Image (spheres, grey):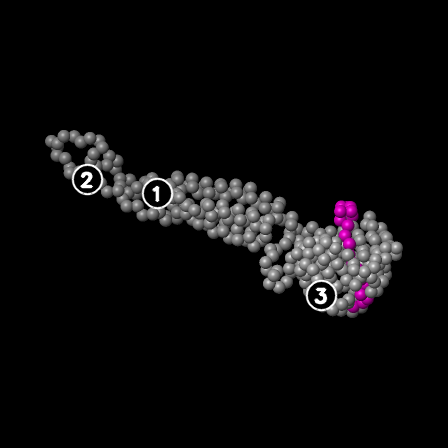
Amino acid sequence: MEPKRGEHGSHVAAPSLWPVGFAIGVAILLLGTILGWVIAGLGAVITALFGFLWIRDATNDLRGEEVAIEPERREVAPRASATAEPRPANEGEAGMPLPEEGEVERYPRSAFLGAATLGVGGVIGGLVTVPVLGFTILPAFTSQGSGQVDVGAVDDFEKEQWLITTFLQDPDQGEVSRRTAYIRNNGELDGQPSFTILSHRCVHLGCPVQPNGPVRDDEATRETRAENEITRIPADPSGFGCPCHGGQYDTEGNRKAGPPVRAMDRYEFSIRGGRLLLGQTYSVSEVRGQGAEARIKRHRLAKPGVHVDGPSSWLYPISPP
């Protein structure tokens, strides 16, 4: 008699490497959330591939892809005569009749239990993994920047004069959010005020950049506006330098010497009601020209030490804002 589906030993899953590959893919995916999106993407591909192969292998019974099983063959003993001695019960023809059409089990319990186990495991894995990934990854890509900062009236910034301007980026956080910007009024461009506003963060390792030239501390002005104490100090720099590792920049923020890999970061700005408002910072690969006529190659804000253009930038993972 041909064995019914689910009654033969072949329904037991054979040893497989798919679960091992799936686990390795998940590990690479989680590691990529720390090291970079390229690694995370590779882990996601490996996880999806081995997960598909694992599920496909485990659901062969449901899809009717069972391995062909050769029916068991028995030698039928010759029919005994009426005068022959009775045979033992373990010899002779089958004691049970063959099943009728419709009596064969169409959906074995073993296949149902296997599918149910995979389904429950997937639900549990999702309930455990999705919240963890959401809390660890999503905050890095949500808007975390503070609003615009009022650093003074446009008239407070004399044309062609550099002012070392310090301010609180978020007054609610206190002094920990104090920032410094080098601001120069370039005059007007197409009837609108033009400013060069450089971040004091060195794009090598993030050290504070200092002006290469005299700083007139005795002429400093201070203003408190909306709980934000703003200080403006005149300076006459010929460029900017990093005291930590010797990085040097010109007055437009272009790298001139040392280890920095790009130009100095800049602040967005806007004019509202005759006041100068600073926005978010952005990265710059190169500045051509000077002052109001400068042409800036702008990029999304990148971490210090990261190239933002050219083939070298392909080696760096995407950084969260």
Residue 181 in the magenta stretch? The answer is yes
| Disc assigned to residue 76 | 2
Element on which disc 3 rests: strand
- In the picture shown, does residue 224 fall above or below 186? above
Residue 192 in the magenta stretch? The answer is no
Closer to the camera in the image, 83 or 179: 179
- 2 or 1: tag closer to the N-terminus: 1
Closer to the camera in the image, 165 or 271: 165
CB of mark 1 within 8 Å of CB of mark 3? no
- 3 or 2: tag closer to the N-terminus: 2
Task: Report whether 236 appears left or right of 21.
Answer: right
Q: Which residues are magenta?
A: 171-189
Task: Report whether 222 appears left or right of 145.
Answer: right
Neighbor class of circle 3 (other Cα within 10 Å; few <14, some 14-19, many 20+) is: some
CB of mark 3 within 8 Å of CB of mark 2? no
Q: Residue at x 80, y 53 (%)?
A: 166
The amino acid pointed to by label 1 is Ser
- In the picture shown, does residue 55 fall above or below 294? above
The amino acid pointed to by label 2 is Val
x, y percent for residue 22: 48, 47
Element on which disc 2 rests: loop
Q: Which residue is mark 1?
A: 10
Q: Residue at x 72, y 54 (%)?
A: 244
- 1 or 3: tag closer to the N-terminus: 1
Q: Nearer the viewer, mark 1 or mark 3?
A: 3
CA gap, disc 3 and disc 2: 95 Å
Q: Which residue is mark 3?
A: 287
Q: Nearer the viewer, mark 3 or mark 2?
A: 3
